[in-house]
Amino acid sequence: MTPELPGYVCPLDGTRADVESARWCCPACGGPWDLDFTPDPAAPLEPAAGPWSLWRYGPALPLSGQIPVSLGEGHTPLVPLTDRIQAKLDFLMPTLSFKDRGAVMLVELARRLGPRRVVADSSGNAGTAFAAYCARAGLRCEVFVPEGTSQKKTERMRAHGAAVRVVPGGREAAARAAREAADEPGVFYASHVFNPYFLHGTKTYVYEVWEQLGGRLPEVLVVPVGNGTLLLGAALAVAELSRRGVRPPALIGVQAEAVAPLAAAFAAGAQDAEPVAQRPTLAEGIAIPAPPRARQILAAVRESGGAIVTVPDDRLRAARADLARRGLSVEPTAAACWAAVSSPAGPLRSRTAVLPLCGAATSGPAEPPASA
């Protein structure tokens, strides 16, 4: 393994591979990779002395030793919603979503590997993030999007110089097209689901919360869950910080009621999730019928003493409108966590909590019916 680039390991069968030569998935089972990397808990972690970006947590990150690509991402503010619930404004990231956290890590990895081009699949925020960071790094970028992706989103990708490939069908069809391209020579697949470097970017969300709360974490972290990239990144950070003596919080995952395979599996006590039908919902960003990392997500939530809950679209609408009245204009998916915890009957039980507002609004809070 190259010392500067921690290698891949399959969480299911233990297969290992060098980052410089590995395929985008485990060759034995076809599943996502984990990373053979554990930060040294004795290494000094002094973020205030670092740059104004997520690279301030360098000792906890798997990429070091070079000046990394950056757009000044991270260090987004915490604002109170109630006396015990705070929101972290990740919609203030450079490309207006939390996906910048993982995108900057994957693009920096790609920059070091030197591919002919970077390919990604996305229905919006991730594609925009990869396009922007590839532009910053001087890398060719190609984003596969499902038909029906909004013109505003594809225009943003193209504005950053990315080639946008519209694929007939839904989200999974776009992913298949990207994976076919990823098997070509000289291509780096920037998969926010299969590549674990992305998770080591999203974990900085929790490191920032720890820093902003003066070296502690709240009793609960509430996270929207589709593919689970933010929740699994949070679980990584919680485990790493607990080795430094920080008390770990419970993880509460939030799914859209219309597409909730993880919530169903959690309620049934299952170790893995069964695929569900794709149904319309306002929370498109977490409407994932068959998340590849379902087993890991369920294990992380259970180990933390947390839960996975669902919210219907009417509560999403109400929560988004309520946030807008508080001056916080976010996309529907970003309102999911507030929808889950804002009622007295929510899952917090008077505990302190932090939730992410993870994507900016591109339109006003009024939305058409979910069946439109």
Image (spheres, rainbow, N blue to C red):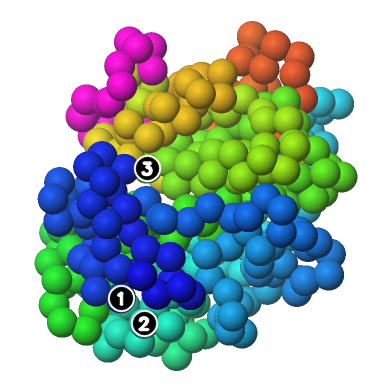
Amino acid tagged 3:
Asn
At mark 2, the secondary structure is helix
Amino acid tagged 1:
Glu
Rendered position, 368 above or below 148: above
**Predominant SS along the magenta part:** loop
Read off the residue under disc 3. 227
Q: Which of the two discs, 2 and 1, sits closer to the camera?
A: 1
Query: Are the two marked residues, 1 and 3, in contact with CB atoms closer than 8 angstroms?
Result: no
Q: Residue at x 81, y 26 (%)?
A: 84
Q: Residue at x 71, y 35 (%)?
A: 354
Residue 146 location in percent, x, y? 24, 58
Read off the residue under disc 1. 20
Read off the residue under disc 2. 113
Rendered position, 339 above or below 126: above
Q: Residue at x 37, y 51 (%)?
A: 34
Residue 158 location in percent, x, y? 38, 79
The residue range painted magenta reads 266-281
Q: Earlier in the sequence, mark 2 or mark 3?
A: 2
Query: Are the two marked residues, 2 and 1, in contact with CB atoms closer than 8 angstroms?
Result: yes
Q: Nearer the viewer, residue 133 or 151?
A: 133
Q: Please say whether residue 248 is one of the residues in the magenta stretch.
A: no
Q: CA distance from mark 1 to mark 3?
A: 25 Å
Determine crowd level at label 3: few under 14, some 14-19, many 20+ residues with C-alpha closer than 10 A.
Answer: many
Rendered position, 27 above or below 2: above
Determine crowd level at label 2: few under 14, some 14-19, many 20+ residues with C-alpha closer than 10 A.
Answer: some
